[in-house]
Image: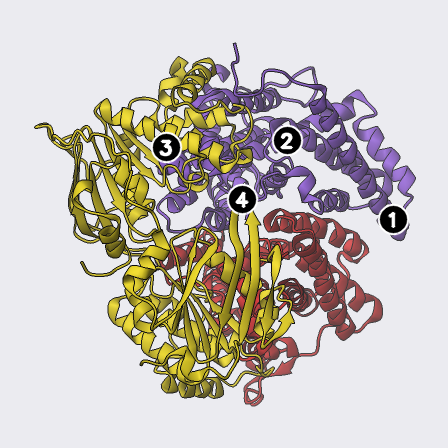
Chain colours: A purple, B red, C yellow
Amino acid sequence: MAQTADPPKNSGFFYQKYLQVILRNLVMILIAFLLFGIILLLSGKNPVLSFRDIFRSTLGSAYGFSEVIVAMTPMLITALAVAFPARVGLINVGAEGQLYMGALFATWGALTFSGLPAWVLLPGMALLGMLGGGLWAFIPGYLKSIGLVNETITSLLLNSVAPSIVSFFIFGYWHAPRDTSTTSNFVKSARLPTLFGTRIDLSFVLAVVLLVLFWLFMKYTRWGLEMRAIGGNSQSARRNGIPLKIYLVSIMCIGGAIAGLAGMAQVSGYYGLLLANFSIGLGFMGFLISWIAGGEPLGIFLISFVVAVIFTGGNLLQLTQGLPYSVINILLAFTLFIVLARPTFFSKRRRS
Amino acid sequence: MSLLAVLGVISSAIYSGTSLLYTTLGEVIDERAGIVNLGLEGVLLVSASLGFAVTKTTGSPYLGILAAVLAGGLMNMVFGYLVITRQANQLASGLAVMFFGYGLSALIGKSFVGAKINPLPRYVLPGLSRLPLVFSSLFKFDFLIFLVVPMAVLIWWLLYRTRWGLGLRAVGENADTAFASGRNPKRIRYQALLVGGLLAGLGAAHLTIAYTMAWSEYMTAGRGFIAVALVIFSNWDPLRAIAGALIFSAAVAFQLLLQSSGAQVSPFLLNTIPYLLTILVLIVWGGNRKQSAPASLGRIYLGSE
Amino acid sequence: MPATPTSHALPGPMVSMRGITKAFPGVLANDGIDLDIYPSDVHALLGENGAGKSTLVKILYGFYRADSGSVLLNGQPVRIQSPADARKFQIGMVFQDFNLIPAFSVAENIALFLPDLKPVIHPKEIDHRIEEISTRYDLQVNPHALVSQLSIGEQQKVEILKLLLSNARLFILDEPTRVLAPHEIKALFGVLENLRKDGYAILLITHKLNEVLECADRISVLRTGRLAGTLTRREASEEKLIAFMFEKSLAGLNRHAHAAARSDRPPILRLTNIATHSLGAQVGLEDINLDIYPHEIVGVAGVSGNGQKELGDVILGLQKCSQGHKELFGQEATSWSIGRVRQSGVAFVPENPLQMAVTPYLSVLENMALTRSRLYARLGGLRVDWGAVQADARESFVRFGFSVPSLFVPVRSLSGGNLQRMTIARELAFDPKLIVGSYLTRGLDLQSTLSARQALLDARQAGAGILLISEDLEELFTLSDRLIVLSRGRIVGSFLPTETDNYTVGRLMTGAKV
């Protein structure tokens, strides 16, 4: 009968708890908006108008909503790329670099095999993307497993290397005839199909499927159980005969492969080409989202949504209020500050 | 290639290395007290934009430097509140500060993009004034450049020859032991972050007011992360940080040289050198267990009951 | 040095503890203990592990607060609520695992605790002070060496120097000899003698009789949280102290009929000349030769920290041996992975289940499944058959006569006894061929203790070989077919339980020569 290791009955208590958490989060976001309003006031803008613009350009219209989905897609995947290794206690700060390497490998596929039909080319690019990200994550994973260097430092340092490698290939070999900083547009068969006539592409579906799979994997499978055992107490997991090193390396690589997939989705879906420095912090954003969500798939989805709303709203703010686009980072940061300042509410597993 | 070109490249390497060294010194202090500040990139951006804005508005580069330094300290205090008082995760908080810096600096610098400022006065290196003007003009440096190496020595002295430095390093190694010796680890960590922030502010000020003399969004271009890498590379030692900054600057200089000589080496690959070198150094040290990262780097100090 | 306390009878006690009582959940660690510590006096606190020695001194040093009782300093009542208070009253303590910063030099570690350190440090001046005091007390150590490069004995010297320079008058040393080599112990006693001459008071925790008799002026013995008695050196003798420490009558022990007949089959476990490197405060094993046959319980007696953990880890494959080899079930197994050792039928009940056997935030059920996750996996691993886990878990609890706890609560919420029962139920459930059990009945009530012991005997009946690590001599004598004594990582004695007695084993455990 019982298919999980959970208590058989689910009382109303849990729903009440969820409600509390959601309510508390909403209050925090409200505070962040208030603080941002003050900043806007100080810089001579009308906060009410600004907030109206943010709302209109995101949740206020079908188009706006679709843009939010577009923005949240890569965050979902990179957050997963951090959350998965986090379950065994690995701190993957390297999703940014893994994303770049995934994009690089996928682009190679798109440029080299452009004659292939989409049903061959796209899965191939996805695999290449995962290979690129996975290889990039193998370096920190392996160095960690042999006890040489901590994965946090290595994955962080490699973040700064990957964009340079991407630039090297673009500027050196792959660039478009007119613009040295990007490749030419990919052929149609190398583009992820879009949905509902919006800019939402297949990678959103993929991201959601991956999140659900992640949840199922951790909850139901034998490997999920062993991963939770490692994450909770690697000492006893070892004594109980769980092969620690193999898990550490392979899970770091899988995390990297997921980030690489996000890179593939960016070039194949969102941009349709590879451009230098295409991501300013998508991987870092994924780290933050995963951290705040405590690595929980539902939390990742909700927080990615909120962050995407903020980012998408920033676009219109730029147009109507004459503010630089990146000013929206302030609102984002305020939200993060407030959430981080109350860690006990969110993360049960505070890692040192 | 002419001697002049070579010297020109070296001169610009010194300029680019200076801000990096100040920033690295700041991060050395943070990390010696046990705190990794990944928000450095954001701190630099805010300091740089504010320093530039104040210089432009008041016409005084010195006021600009002061503003940048104070902004650096203030930004680190925000970070400190999160990681020390609220005991939030250091990596996540650092990244949040980074995003904050992206936004705030864009807002501050909005109306100063493309503006021109009074440069910081530059002085000829003593002894070189008798050289022909074309040479000596290459070796005219502002006071921040002259101060940077003494500053590294000063920081070393502070860390290794004062009671404050001893306590600070003890906090970074084992906050409980530091507490047992009658010190307040939280207060010491705040102090470390303050000093580190001031130094980062100085680095940012040099970058924008003395070196580039211009402001643009994301102008720090990853310098915060380079500084974090250099701290590791220099084994958390302020004196070795000089060497680290020199090596990095040399890589930059080398890159410029190659470009000016028309060699076919991509600057992008050269960009990766400092990071790859740091990883290599870590592997070598890790193997020999010589690495001297502060033992409780990144750990939250929960305090004692 | 026949300096008896009576020869300096005039000064009153420097520190007096009166009626100290401290309870932890489930244990009364200290029960109305009175203790007087005199200047110019080495006072040894003797007792088995768990007798309450550490708790008592940690109360004195302000780490714990007593539930009741008082501390008097030179006759005046004082309140010691933190280590800082203790240091203010010139009480210093050297912890078992030390409190030094490995990355700092000796001088830096000492300077950190100098009460009169100036804002600007003059290393020469500090070196000079260290040198002065270290020559005086024969505590030579290079002030510029990094602590991480020092031997354990040298680190201890640094700790003592630290206390001397921070003006402590009472030194508490928690098992200072545990990790020292014999010549280092000798040197330490020399230092203590000098300190005593200069009027310092020394409180020394140990469970080694010979050392106590060698260096102490006054000996207090604790047993299960109570003061069994205080003797002066003159009154003390080995026999008296052992009687105080163990006080368990050998008569009337209900020994099971030992099926001592060894089968002709190969041993389940054979360790040949095993040695391990000692890391830091760890004890290294040396020259371990041990066979365990089917139908046999081998008891390992010894004071904890003498290589028991390492022995278990070597058998499990967690620790690599620097020398020697290991056979399991007749096969060469020195380099087997832990997973392979486990799957071959080795059960393991570690000394500290919360840290070494379970994942605290997973549920009881999930922890029950952990060691056999491959067998409970369905669809190649995509699903875990929790129904089967539940059924098996319930069955094994019932089989061992334990009450079934809630299977869905996180393990960290279990009491110590429940946790121990869970670990035993999990490990013994599937007829293991070799059982390595440390302190198997620690924290169990009488009923569960009997159940656990019965489970071991049943396993033996079924043909298992069992390595039973314990400090409880009664348990070892009751259950073992063979008894070995471990001291400093070596096997110092091997007996049939009928050939020996508590006294001999107790002497070997506490480091005396037979």
In the image, which is nearer the foreground, mark 3 or mark 4? 3
Q: Is residue C47 left or right of residue B170?
A: left
Q: Amino acid at mark 4?
A: Val
Q: Which residue is mark 1?
A: A38
Residue at 43% x, 33% y is C446
The disc, 3 or 1, on the residue closer to the chain's N-terminal end is: 1
Residue A75 rendering spot, x and y as whole percentages: 62, 33
Kindly give the residue lying farthest to the left in the view shown. Answer: C264
The disc, 2 or 3, on the residue closer to the chain's N-terminal end is: 3
Quarter the N terminus of chain C occupies: bottom left
Q: Is residue C13 left or right of residue A289?
A: left
Q: Amino acid at mark 1?
A: Ile
Q: Mark 2 and mark 3: span between their CA atoms?
A: 28 Å
Residue A178 rendering spot, x and y as whole percentages: 59, 39
The disc, 4 or 1, on the residue closer to the chain's N-terminal end is: 1
Residue B185 rendering spot, x and y as whole percentages: 62, 64
The disc, 3 or 4, on the residue closer to the chain's N-terminal end is: 4
Q: Nearer the viewer, residue C509 or B298?
A: C509
Q: Is residue C219 left or right of residue C185?
A: right
Q: Nearer the viewer, residue C409 or A264?
A: C409
How crowded pointer 4 is (Cα within 10 Å; few <14, some 14-19, many 20+) is rated as many
Q: Which residue is mark 3?
A: A242
In the image, which is nearer the foreground, mark 2 or mark 3? 3
How crowded pointer 1 is (Cα within 10 Å; few <14, some 14-19, many 20+) is rated as some
Q: Which residue is mark 2?
A: A300
Q: Which residue is mark 4?
A: A93
Residue C157 rendering spot, x and y as whole percentages: 38, 74
In the image, which is nearer the foreground, mark 2 or mark 1? 2
Q: Secondary structure at mark 1?
A: helix
State whether discs 2 and 1 lie on one chain: yes
Q: Is residue C113 left or right of residue A323?
A: left
